[in-house]
Image (tube, helix red, strand yellow):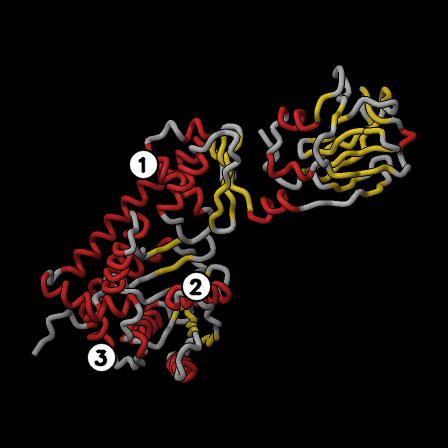
Amino acid sequence: MRSALPAFNEIWQRQFRSDCLSQSETFSEQASFLIGCSGGVDSMLLLRLMSLLYPQKIRAIYIDHQLQAPSADWGRFVAESCALLNVPCIVQKVAVAEGNLENQARSARYQAYQQHLSTHEILVLAHHQQDQAETLILRLLSGAGIHGLAAMRALDQRDEMTIWRPMLNLSREQICQWAAELNVQNIQDPSNFNIQYDRAWARAELWPMLQSRYPKMQLALSRSSALMQDAEDILADVLAQDMVSCGTSDRLQLEKLQALSLPRQRQLLSAWMKGQEQYRPSFDMVQRLMHEVIDSKMDSQAALHCNGFYYLRFSGGVFRISSAEYMLSKHEQFAMQTIQLHDNQLFKVLSGQFQIQYTETYGLSPTLLCQNLSLVQRQGGEKIHLHGRSGSWPLKKAIQQAQIFPWLRHRIQILSIDDVMLGVFTPKGFWLAESPYCVAAGWQPQLVSSDNRKTGF
């Protein structure tokens, strides 16, 4: 009896081969392919199809997670299968970190892929239509939005790699039929049937129940993910416009942010907080940023920590700074230094890199060059008489007026000689102090580059 599903030779000539070639038209002529092979029926069929489509342009990689006793044997099986097809094969062992086993194994796997991908090489994975539907269901149950429900794309362009999933529109039934027709050998990973894992549970328990009620569920869910991908692309266009309007990767202007509707504010903050990470922060974390930081009182100094960054509000903006920079501002203390400066010298202090240059106006006396000068971190309570202004005033007030960010103020250092203040090094440059050493056409340290781009407004 003829199978209800199209035979391999029939659909290969009519559709699948042409679809794959069409999808890959965006790749450069130099493109080659690295195929992720687990040894299962899906990836082993993919290996066979790619060997027919792109002979001499493919390699395979098996990731040994070392979580099961026969994993090394599976690696040898994949390598031997590749040898029969004249396909080079990499077997890579990885260590899976503690935590959510599925997530950590996936992370280790993709790190290994990235390690072995060559220039112009595309990572090819064997995800199929049921994988797509399962992904959408699991993400829906976890409270995902458009980005999660868009699930997997046939062509997925990431900053570090390009992923191609040419079998994403094939059903598992079709894959199994083709594998049988082509006599594709494979192994069975028992973890795929262990329902303590979410995906295995969904496949064994949830899927049959839903499919008995909705026989065309798999196709419908796949179509839903395609619609979500369209919505995601539209949202990406809006986000790009809002990001240009509201700020940069380090800072958002609150006035422009709050002029947007609340949904657009949430979406922009979510994308902004994601930065270069793979996943967006939780909805609750975005809400905390809005309520605890953005809506906080101006003098509250509220700070929210999320994924290695601190988010702070300051003078009309909300800022994203690294945890390391933030913690330095809270705890780092530096001892007094003795330095000698020379004509045209390029030197570095906490605020950045400076160079000694002569000015046409006022500066420091040349007699100070090559002398021992003191450099000390501000402690608080100091006063400064800025050259060209009348009277002394608190250094703290000068810093506030210059709008130097609070998390950079630990970098401010005072230059002096014999307890006479000569000036102050700040992330915005050197401030010359009024002193007996001020002379016409003297020298001043000129800021060449700051240690931190976020120096102020």
Label 1 element class = helix
Contact, CB < 8 Å: mark 2 with mark 1? no
Q: What amino acid is at disc 3?
A: Ala
The residue labelled by disc 3 is 180
How many numbered marks, from 0 up? 3
Give the residue at x 43% y 72%: 61
Q: Is residue 19 visible?
A: no
Q: Residue 84's x, y, as percent?
A: 38, 82
Q: Disc 2 on helix, strand or loop?
A: helix
Q: Quadrant of the C terminus?
A: top right
Residue 378 found in image quarter = top right
Distance between the alpha carbons at the discs numbered 1 and 3: 50 Å
Q: Quadrant of residue 100?
A: bottom left
Please give left or right for residue 165 compared with residue 455 in the image. Answer: left
Q: Amino acid at mark 1?
A: Pro
Q: Quadrant of the N terminus?
A: bottom left
Callout 3: SS? helix
The 10 Å Cα crowd at callout 3, few under 14, some 14 to 19, many 20 or more, is some
Q: Earlier in the sequence, mark 2 or mark 1?
A: 2
Sequence-wise, the earlier of marks 3 and 2 is: 2
Whether residue 356 is visible here, answered yes or no, is yes
Residue 230 coordinates in the image, percent (x, y): 27, 46
Residue on which the image places disc 1: 263
Residue 65 shown left or right of residue 368 in the figure: left
Q: Nearer the viewer, residue 6 or 152?
A: 152
For the residue marked with disc 2, what is the amino acid?
Ser
Residue 422 point in image, percent of width and height: 82, 29
Residue named by callout 2: 107
